[in-house]
Image (cartoon, rainbow, N blue to C red):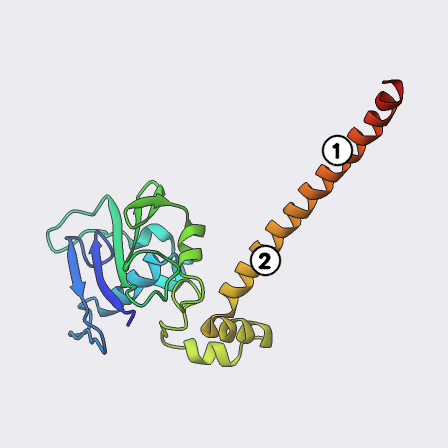
Amino acid sequence: MSHLRSITMKGFKSFPQRTKLEFAPGVGVVVGPNGSGKSNVTDAVLWALGEQSPLAVRGQTMQDVIFAGGHGLKSSRAAEVEVVVDNSDGVLDSEFSELSIMRRLDRSGEGEYRLNGARCRLVDVIEALSDTGLGKEAHSIVSQGRVETIIHSRPRDRRLLIEEAAGLGKHRKRRRRAELKLGRAEENLSRSLDVEREARSRLRPLKRQA
């Protein structure tokens, strides 16, 4: 069964040093006193999976996720979070039994994403998480006020959320790609037929001359 296998944070918010949390299948609980960084763990997951709004991870700018220093430690040069998801049942659109998603951001604003160690684009991360309930509009991560926001959202937005939960979006994307390929094949066939007709029209006078 697919599940969150681990989260590794370094330089992210209240985690200046490399910190790894591992999870087994089933229910996992992160406990601790107020101010110990529990909410930052959720922020780290959202951020690694492609969240683009600083407000969604409780910041004013995206650089606010980088450890600012404190408790005798210097500020970090960059924030880095890696999320590893178990994919043994093939829920994710990947050939691998697990999917590693890493995001890094330095203070200059330069950032990068990696899928299983290979550098990629944000759109690749979004595509890999399509219809899984993870990512920016995740229905698997419910923050305070999220339920109320969904209830009061537009019907179209609720419908899109339900479709993602049902896995319809992935099939629509695949159908769209298949339709585009079919359209290109039909165009190529039409051009080939035009070339054939043109060749035949030129060949007829040559046959008469022969």
| Position of residue 181 in the picture relative to residue 16 (left or right) | right
Task: Look at label 1 and name its amino acid.
Answer: Val
Q: Name the spot of residue 77 as percent of width and height, x first.
A: 23, 43
Q: Nearer the viewer, mark 1 or mark 2?
A: 1
Residue at image position (54%, 71%) is 160
| Position of residue 164 in the picture relative to residue 63 (left or right) | right
Disc marking residue 176 = 2
Residue at image position (29%, 69%) is 2
Q: Name the spot of residue 133 as percent of width and height, x first.
A: 40, 69
**Among the 4 quarters of the image, the one containing residue 153:** bottom right
Question: Can you say whether 38 is above or below 60 in the image?
Answer: below
The residue closer to the viewer here, 196 or 46, is 196
Residue picked out by circle 1: 195
Secondary structure under tag 1 reads helix
Disc marking residue 76 = none
- Kindly report the distance in space between the C-alpha atoms of the residues bearing marks 1 and 2: 29 Å
Question: Can you say whether 162 is above or below 77 in the image?
Answer: below
Report if residue 52 is visible in the image.
no
Quarter placement of the N terminus: bottom left
Question: Can you say whether 109 is above or below 89 in the image?
Answer: above
Task: Look at label 2 and name its amino acid.
Answer: Arg
- Answer with mark 1 or mark 2, whichever residue precedes in sequence: 2
